[in-house]
Amino acid sequence: MTSSMPVRAQNLTLIKGIAPNRLGGFVGSDLRGNQVSVLRARTKTLAPKCSLSAARPVSQPRFIQHKKEAFWFYRFLSVVYDHVINPGHWTEDMRDDALEPADLSDRGLVVVDVGGGTGFTTLGIVEHVDAKNVTILDQSPHQLAKAKEKEPLKECKIIEGDAEDLPFDTGYADRYVSAGSIEYWPDPQRGIREAYRVLKLGGKACLIGPVYPTFWLSRFFADAWMLFPKEEEYIEWFEKAGFKDVQLKRIGPKWYRGVRRHGLIMGCSVTGVKPASGDSPLQLGPKAEDVSAPVNPLVFLLRFLLGATAGMYYVLVPIYMWLKDQLVPKGQPI
Ligand SMILES: C[S@@+](CC[C@H](N)C(=O)[O-])C[C@H]1O[C@@H](n2cnc3c(N)ncnc32)[C@H](O)[C@@H]1O
């Protein structure tokens, strides 16, 4: 799982955690999940000491980190996604905080929202950018059907597609946004390489995703469910794709008080700038997953059920943390 590749992130800036601790400061955590107090938007240069992770061997689980399984996962989840999933895991506060580094500073910017799903993050984008300039792409027609129902997204282009093989010309967009989708990509480096390709010179990618938990039980369920990258992996993928000025901002709901050990809803927003026009300097082989290849239906069903069951743990964690936030006196760590 881990490789001995040298860490190349010495000059990267980590914008540290921002949950208010009600004592006037803010609570964040270091890369090991230890809680530390920080000032809002205070920045610190980090040189991660741990080695970077290589791709997980196919022989190991992560039952939903495949396009077919993700397709079926969202076939069912799309019915309740906006009402049940987002309020617990991906709140409007978090979304706005995570989109801030995307620098959506001009209504005329051309933006692609990759893995845009029901359009929850797109709703945050169209507050800053004209909807007619925004494209929502997702592999799930069921998720996109929900996005099509939303009035503020009526003028967006809404298309089916694969994050690892985007149907946009090289140099098409000013901004690439993707929120909460990388965890289902079998080959995340390929998706980030595509982000680089579709951007114009000087364009910015903003990728929002979960972080790998530091608590053993959370790690167990994360590994059985889907991809929870480490912070340094996000940075490595961005750098390898060719991005410059790579930055990572930690995000999380305020009621989590900066605790990061459980993962998922304590995530990050990673940004990078495209420094040269054209394709990414990174060359990759053929795609890891052939979605048209036949699968054994029983194995598929078993993987799907195990993955979805593991995901239930992450429905319980935010409820547990919310209860803790209610019970533990304000200002104390939880
Ligand atoms: C957790 S949802 C996030 C949706 C939306 N971005 C939001 O902020 O609410 C993940 C989305 O990624 C989509 N997805 C997963 N793998 C994909 C892929 N390879 N290409 C495009 N979309 C993908 C899923 O269909 C799903 O709609």
Image (spheres, helix red, strand yellow):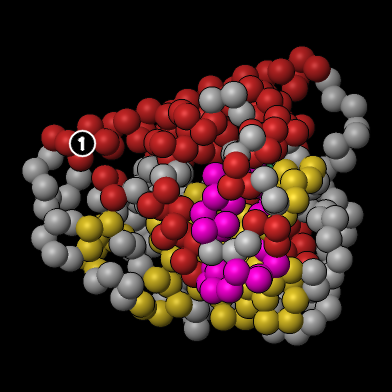
Q: Residue 255 or 191: which is nearer the viewer?
A: 255
- Where on the picture, by quarter, is residue 26? bottom left
Q: Depth check: give the residue in front, 54 or 305.
A: 305
In this orientation, which residue lies closer to the viewer: 187 or 265?
A: 265
Number of other residues with Cα within 10 Å of mark 1, as a class: few under 14, some 14 to 19, many 20 or more: some
Query: What range of the chain is rendered magenta?
Result: 102-127
Rendered view: 49 above or below 265? below
Task: Tell whether 17 sits left or right of 101.
Answer: left
Report the front residue among 11 and 322: 322
Image: 304 above or below 334: above
> Image point 13% across, 64% down: which residue?
24
Residue 320 in sight here = yes
Label 1 amino acid? Lys
Q: Is residue 234 left or right of residue 193?
A: left
Which residue is pictured at 74% across the width and 46% down the height? 158
Task: Indicate yes or no: mark 1 CB to ligand 1 under 8 Å.
Answer: no
Residue 178 horizontal/vertical position (percent): 62, 55
**Whole-percent x and y of residue 119?**
60, 44
Q: Is residue 14 above or below residue 73?
A: below
Local SS, label 1: helix
| Residue drawn at the location 29% of the way across and 50% of the way down | 254
**Magenta stretch encompasses residue 126:** yes
Q: Does the stretch in magenta take in 119?
A: yes
Identify the residue at horizontal 63%, vertical 47% (top origin).
153
**Residue under pointer 1:** 324
Q: Quadrant of residue 262?
A: top left
Q: Is residue 287 left or right of residue 201?
A: right
Q: In the rendered view of the protein, which quadrant contains the C terminus?
A: top left
Q: Residue 266's x, y, as percent?
A: 40, 50
Left or right: where 32 falls relative to 39: right
Q: Is residue 52 visible?
A: no
